[in-house]
Image (tube, rainbow, N blue to C red):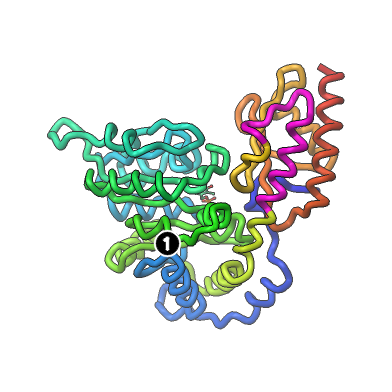
Amino acid sequence: MIDLRSDTVTRPTSAMWEAMRAAPLGDDVLGDEPTVRELEAKVAALLGQDAALYVPSGTMANQLAIRTVCEGGDEILAHRESHIIHYETGSPAALSGCMISPLDGAGGVFDADAVRAAIRHRDQHAPLSRMLVVENTANRGGGTVWSVEQFAAVATAARIGGLHLHIDGARLMNACVALGVGPRDFTAHADSVSLCFSKGLGAPVGSALVGPHAFIARARRFRKMFGGAMRQSGLLAAAAIYALDHHVARLADDHKNARALAAAIAQIPGLSLEGPPEKIPTNMVFFRVAAALGNAQSFCDHLRETGVLALGLGPDRVRMVTHLDVSARDIESASVALATVATSCKGSH
Ligand SMILES: *Cc1c(COP(=O)(O)O)cnc(C)c1O
């Protein structure tokens, strides 16, 4: 199978397994897990923040940031297509009693004016605008990368408006590799950051939440409350350390493979790529399936029969994501499969 549903599907490489096997272990809840501590120090330094907390998922990292900063009745500003709105099970409402004000903008990105317009006057009638979430890369936006300038302008608007700025950086390293900048070009302007090791970085499990000491100390209490405090989690943290050491620069290969896949899709009648293939920003490719070929789900079902997996998102939208476990040759095979399936679907509808 060539699995292009998500970059979360990667298996540990043998070198990563070796690093996991060799990791010294302790009990993180008792406070003496050496490998988790090493990972947390490493991530905090990488992102130029005081401290980090290793957590089981990116969702937990985001939700801990929200729970740590917000009170019931507060409002969070986030893009309409953001992960915290679409894919976190309503948890800002369920776990923290917060509502979300959706911001608009092309490709999952918004500007400083949108932030300023959404910040409410402090008035007893109004929810308190407390937090701004910036997703970089923007997943449903197309794997979009924020420009450093636009991000800085939005960060300034957030600071002036008294908002906590949280970066949902599940794929922040993809953004950095795509732009050729370091993470601090973004994180220096942020109050907290979440980063996934289980996406393009290729670790099997885990994310980090990063921020100031007092913020992380409070988040650590909520991690326990949410059931996310783990024991010999150094086993998993070792994979994340290995990923940070060995799998960042190679994200450029995933971006190149995504552009090659997009170029192939752009040539297939009945499939319409979102945007020009040379503008694919990172490792995600989105396209629409013409009605004459059926719908997104039936297209993905037929594609599966050829050994290629893609994700149907909505009635006609399909997502394919490149990662560590797909090669340039796999992309060629997937491109042939897409063309074959598109032709046979057209024949049968
Ligand atoms: C994947 C992802 C997350 C976290 O997802 P988990 O599956 O909970 O690890 C958060 N934000 C974005 C933008 C993501 O793509």
The question of residue 263 being in magenta is answered with yes
Q: What amino acid is at disc 1? A: Arg
Task: Classify residue 291 as left or right of residue 102.
Answer: right
Q: On the image, numbered disc 1 is attached to which residue? A: 184
Residue 347 against residue 319 in the figure, above or below: above
Q: Nearer the viewer, residue 77 or 257?
A: 257
Q: What is the magenta range?
A: 254-276
Task: Name the residue located 57 percent from the left edge and 68 percent from the top edge.
Answer: 244
Q: Nearer the viewer, residue 178 or 132?
A: 178
Task: Classify residue 155 as left or right of residue 292.
Answer: left
Task: Name the residue located 58 percent from the left edge and 61 percent from the top edge.
Answer: 205
The question of residue 108 being in magenta is answered with no
The answer to which image quadrant residue 237 occupies is bottom right
Percent x, y for residue 6?
Answer: 65, 47
Task: Name the residue located 35 percent from the left edge and 55 percent from the top edge.
Answer: 190
Task: Classify residue 48 as left or right of residue 348.
Answer: left
Q: Is mark 1 within 8 Å of ligand 1?
A: no
Residue 85 against residue 328 in the figure, above or below: above
Task: Name the residue located 29 percent from the left edge and 50 percent from the top edge.
Answer: 164
**SS label for mark 1:** helix
Percent x, y for residue 20?
Answer: 63, 75
